[in-house]
Each structure stands twice: as C-alpha cells, then as structure tokens.
Amino acid sequence: MPTRLRLLKGATALLYVGPLFAGMCGLGWGLVAPFVGIFVVWLMVLRPEQWPASPAEWLTLPAWGAALAQVLSQLLLVTVLLAVGRGLGALAGFLPVVNPIFPLAVSFLAIPLCRMLWDARSAADQGIYLDDEAEAAQAPRAAAEAAAAIVPLLNLPDGALDEKVAAQVAQVMNVAGAEMRLKALAMALSQPDRSHAALRRALVVWASEPEVVAPGRVASVMAHAFAIADRNADLLRLYLPRAIALIAAFPDRAEDFPNPDQLRLVASLGPDTGAFSDLPDHLRADLRDGLQALARSVERAIAAGESPDEVRREELVQQAARPA
C-alpha cells in the first residue's frame, strides 16, 4: 500500500503539470475551462466522498453549494498554476510552441492512472484512507456496510451444519472489505451473551487458512481469530495447531498474530477459569503448552524481522536485567 500511495502521488503530479506547462508555453486563458473540467473529474474519481452520493442528494441545495465550492476551488487552482507557468516562461525568455491538446492530455492522463492505482470505495472498505478528511467521510459508510454484511452470519443457529456455516462465512468474508467485517464480527462475538458456537468454529478455520494469512490482506487476522475463540477450550485446540504451523510457514506475518504477552496471560489462568474449566489435567497441560509454544514462535518471528542491531540491543538489555 505505501508503494501504491507513492505512485498515486506521482500520477497526481501530472494533473498539475498540465496547466503549469500550458502557462510556460504562453497558451491563452481559453484553456482554463477545460482544465477545470479535468480537475473536477479527477476530484470525483479520487475523492468521491466530497460529492453527493445519489441523484436525490444532487437535488438538494446544500449539495449544489458544496459542488459549486469544489468547482470554484479548482478554478482558482488552475488559474494560479497557469499564472505561475506564464511567469516562469517569461523569466526563462523562451516560450515553446506546442499544440494546446498536449498539456490538456498530460493533465487528463492523471485521471485513468489515479483510478487504476486507487479505488476510494474499496480502500475505505479495508479501512484505508487518503487522509483524515476522507476517513471522516467514508468510515461511517464502510462501517455500516460491514455491519449489514455480517448480520446473516450472526443469525445462524448454533446447531447449523459446519459445512453450511463455513460456506456462508467464505461468501461473506472473501471480499475486499474482509478486514472491517472481521473486526465487526469480533466485536459482536465479544458480548458475553453470545454463543454462536458454529460461527466461531467456521471463523477460526477461515481466518487460519494459508491463503488468508499468507498475503496479509486482512490485518491482524489471527489475532481476531484468537479473540473469537474466546478462551474456549475446543476452539483453542482447533486454533493452536493451525496457528503454530502458520507462524512457522509465514514468519513475516507475525504482526497479524496475537501478542505473546496475551497468549501467556491466557496460559497462566487458573484451572477454573475460561478455557481451563472442566478440563482433565492432561488436556489443560496440553493447552498451556500450546499457548506457550505459540508465544515463543511469534516472538522469534518478530525478532527475525528486526535488524540485527535491534536484536543485539534487546539481548544486551535482557542480560543486564538478569541478576548476577
């Protein structure tokens, strides 16, 4: 995503180069209107949250006022760029002769390039925004859509067949906005009065599939799956072997796993608490060993991703903290 954002900035620069170059070439003010049209279309493509979202909204007076403000701001920007370009051309004492279509084409090229690099709606569904203004405008819509999408899953009965629940989970979660939907599910399932045993099993299995974890498309996916397991012994016994295998296979995805301290905290709970209640001693010991093993694996993966200097510094600090 950082690479895509850098490319987006480069593509956006083409938008401003057009009127600047037109001014340097001494082209007339007759190009202001087409440049403003290009700038407005670019704004609609890259920042749809700043424009009315429906035909009915376009018919309201506030929408027309907001749209007019956007057009006037782009008019001012184009005028300033043309004036700066004319000033630079006069200082250089050389005005190249070009077809007026060329600077317009340069600016227009920014529209398809930016659209290929950035889909504002899809990015918002994943919780990614260009800036705070875009987040404030897009986040409520994305959150509402994620909440609506998970309602059918929350309505599934506990006695539903695992195959049926797994199919519905895959249908709802295998989309671009899976991260927000998983967060919404984890929040909904955190309520103490919610059982949803079949849904929890299906989500733990879905979240711990290699094709979900490896690409890193869903941030903190294994951490959310651990929260959904909710310290349930059966779910943790399903989760732990898959998690240990995944962290060994994809150590670069360590940031998507639960924090090692959190894992150790669950492992240290008393025999009558959470996942350890009503368990035979040997199963309780296996569960604790699995949690400790996963904590160590996550720590090793995190350390392997750090620079050697940072790892060595941590080792020295640990050695200094040990009693003589």
Image: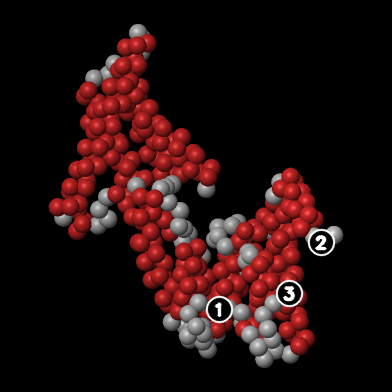
Q: Is residue 191 above or below residue 105?
A: below
- Residue at left offset 17%, top offset 52%: 62
| Tag 3: amino acid | Gly
Give the Cα distance between marks 1 and 2.
45 Å
Pair 2/3: label in front: 2
Residue 237 image position (x, y, % from top left): 68, 79
Residue 266 image position (x, y, % from top left): 65, 76
| Tag 2: amino acid | Pro
Badge 1: how crowded within 10 Å, few (<14), some, or many (20+)?
Answer: many
Marked residue nearer the N-terminal end (2 or 3):
3
Residue 66 image position (x, y, % from top left): 21, 47
- Residue at left offset 38%, top offset 71%: 148
Marked residue nearer the N-terminal end (1 or 2):
1
Give the Cα distance between marks 1 and 3.
20 Å
**Residue position for label 2:** 323
Q: Closest to the observer: 70 or 173?
A: 70
Residue sitting farthest toward the top: 93
Badge 3: how crowded within 10 Å, few (<14), some, or many (20+)?
Answer: many
Q: Is residue 239 above or below residue 313?
A: below
Badge 2: how crowded within 10 Å, few (<14), some, or many (20+)?
Answer: few
Residue 6 image position (x, y, % from top left): 50, 39
Element carrying mark 1: helix
- Residue at left offset 71%, top offset 68%: 294
- Residue at left offset 50%, top offset 83%: 192
**Residue position for label 1:** 200
Marked residue nearer the N-terminal end (1 or 3):
1
User: Along the horizontal axis of the image, is 202 left or right of 131?
Assistant: right
User: Along the horizontal axis of the image, is 276 left or right of 130?
Assistant: right
Q: Is residue 25 visible?
A: no
Give the Cα distance between marks 2 and 3.
29 Å
**Residue position for label 3:** 290
